Image (tube, helix red, strand yellow):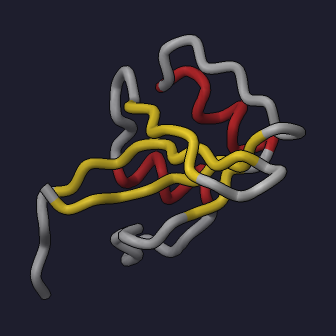
Amino acid sequence: MIYYKVRRYVSVLREFDENFECEIDFKVEPSIDVLRKIFGVPDDDLMYAEFPIDCRIGGLLKPFLDGLSFDFFAYSYFLSCSRI
């Protein structure tokens, strides 16, 4: 299996038109093990896909983000991953 160095971040899309708004970097990026627990994925999942962030997950990610206040009425949020 090939492993890549990746950057994980939060993608923000406007709810009304689903257009991209911005990317938000983690203040301190959580480890893959922590992310697996937060998102409830298997231990062998490398989490290269996008994962939707709901209110519960947003609350668990908040300590890793620098002052982000989630607005789930106006925006959709996703854990995103890009190869570096």
Residue at 82 percent of width and 38 percent of height: 74
Residue at 59 percent of width and 44 percent of height: 12
Q: Compared to 22, does 40 lie above or below? A: below
Q: Residue 72 occupies which quadrant of the picture?
A: top right
Residue at 13 percent of width and 67 percent of height: 4
- Report the front residue among 11 and 37: 11
Q: Position of residue 50 (x, y in %)?
A: 51, 66
Left or right: residue 47 versus residue 53 is left
Left or right: residue 38 versus residue 54 is left
Left or right: residue 9 versus residue 50 is left
- Quadrant where the C terminus is found in the figure: bottom left
Task: Please identify the residue farthest to the right as the structure is shown.
Answer: 73
- Report the front residue among 16 and 51: 16
Residue at 50 percent of width and 43 percent of height: 10
Q: Position of residue 75 (x, y in %)?
A: 75, 42
- Quadrant where the N terminus is found in the figure: bottom left
Picture mark count: 0
Q: Position of residue 23 (x, y in %)?
A: 45, 39
Q: Compared to 46, does 63 lie above or below? A: above
Task: Please identify the residue farthest to the bottom as the structure is shown.
Answer: 1
Q: Position of residue 11 (x, y in %)?
A: 52, 47
- Report the front residue among 73 and 39: 73
Q: Residue 67 occupies which quadrant of the picture?
A: top right
